[in-house]
Amino acid sequence: MRVAFVGKGGSGKTTLSSLFARYAATRARVVAIDADINQHLALVLGAEQPRPLGGMLTEIKDHLRGDNPRIPSASVMVKTTPPGRGSRLLTLDDPFFPSVEVQGLRLMATGPFGEDDLGVACYHSKVGAVELYLNHLVDGPGEYVVVDMTAGADSFASGMFTKFDVTFLVVEPTRQGVSVYRQYQEYAAEFDVAIAVVGNKVQTADDRAFLRDQVGPDLLTCLDHSPAVRAMEQGRAFTLDDLEPGNLAGLQTLLDRVDAAEKDWAKFGRQAHEFHLRNARAWADRATGCDLADQIDPGFIFGSVALESEMRAAAGRP
Ligand SMILES: Nc1ncnc2c1ncn2[C@@H]1O[C@H](COP(=O)(O)OP(=O)(O)OP(=O)(O)O)[C@@H](O)[C@H]1O
Ligand SMILES: [Mg+2]
């Protein structure tokens, strides 16, 4: 299952991504990905920064296109290019993507948006590496991918937000927090994306009532303002056992929500194709000089069927 944390700047996306990923990792296999412009997830998890995926786009494209005849070179592969027959599909433990092991999980990162990037690359091309990864990943039961997304509506500016089984929208109990929720609700409805709201930094019964009143049934649960998280921020040692019982219960509610979601590979494939066509028409056809609609393989079936046949083909390769 793939899970994204989105929300307003400072609402707690990185904090909740890290806590949720650590919590899920006590029960299952977890890959956490920092896809924010400001890379903080490694710091919060106490890890070294992994090698940035954003700096190895061409290698990633060459790896993923495999021997898909519709993608003859990395230069015609764009972030939305979907897998087809011959593409290399990924499992959660794929060794090609650089990661670091920390807190029982694998951490990957797009890498920071540096000074050098100004004018030559945009944030979306960097997170394109994550989009390609998610497009080619076939995650199975008992596996979780947790992505810390960039702040605000920017996370809706690419096709990334259609790559998740559940999107957690982190909302503080303020009017501004709620207005971001309403904006996201509209985008999500337009693209048939499942959103669950997680209240965060809740301090009082009034905070809780405010969120319940403003968000209604989309409000899944609330996490309280946590002295344990604050202590962690101040550099003190932290384990999940230090977390307040109410906040631990909140993490379990998130996990239950993810486990209750139904994997819908057909929808995933449909949306991957739809966003690829949009992207092709908007700029990518012009940029590559090709009709990128040809990269869509109508005979390719997303999900475990494709993975199994790819594995059979790989076993037959010299
Ligand atoms: N439940 C919580 N209890 C206490 N402090 C919290 C909680 N959630 C987040 N914080 C604190 O709020 C601040 C912002 O959190 P965080 O960095 O996770 O937000 P973010 O949404 O990832 O921000 P950005 O948009 O900058 O990436 C941090 O100092 C963090 O420790
Ligand atoms: Mg953050």
Image (spheres, rainbow, N blue to C red):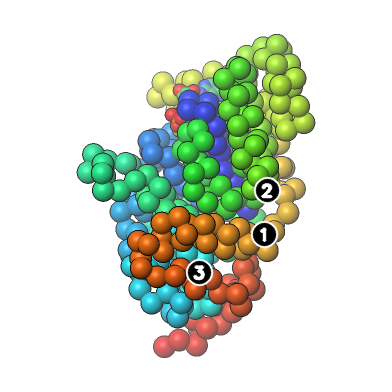
Q: Could you tell me which residue is drawn at 67 percent across and 15 percent down?
A: 207
Residue 99 as seen in the image, left or right of residue 315: left
Is residue 140 placed above or below 232 in the rendered structure?
below
Q: Could you tell me which residue is drawn at 48 percent across and 25 percent down?
A: 10
Name the amino acid, label 2.
Answer: Asp
Query: Is disc 2 in contact with disc 1, using a CB cutoff of under 8 Å?
Result: yes
Q: CA distance from mark 2 to mark 1?
A: 9 Å
Front one among 58 and 256? 58
Q: Cβ(mark 2) to ligand 1 < 8 Å?
A: no
Pointer 1: what residue? 267
Q: Could you tell me which residue is drawn at 64 percent across and 42 percent down?
A: 188
Is residue 154 placed above or below 219 in the rendered structure?
below
Of marks 3 and 1, which one's residue comes earlier in the chain?
1
Pointer 2: what residue? 192
Query: Residue 12 location, x and y as percent?
Result: 52, 28
Residue 253's quadrant in the figure? top right
Query: Is disc 2 in contact with disc 3, using a CB cutoff of under 8 Å?
Result: no
Density class for disc 3 (Cα within 10 Å; few <14, some 14-19, many ≥20) is some
Q: CA distance from mark 2 to mark 3?
A: 23 Å
Viewer-nearest of discs 2 and 3: 3
Pointer 3: what residue? 293
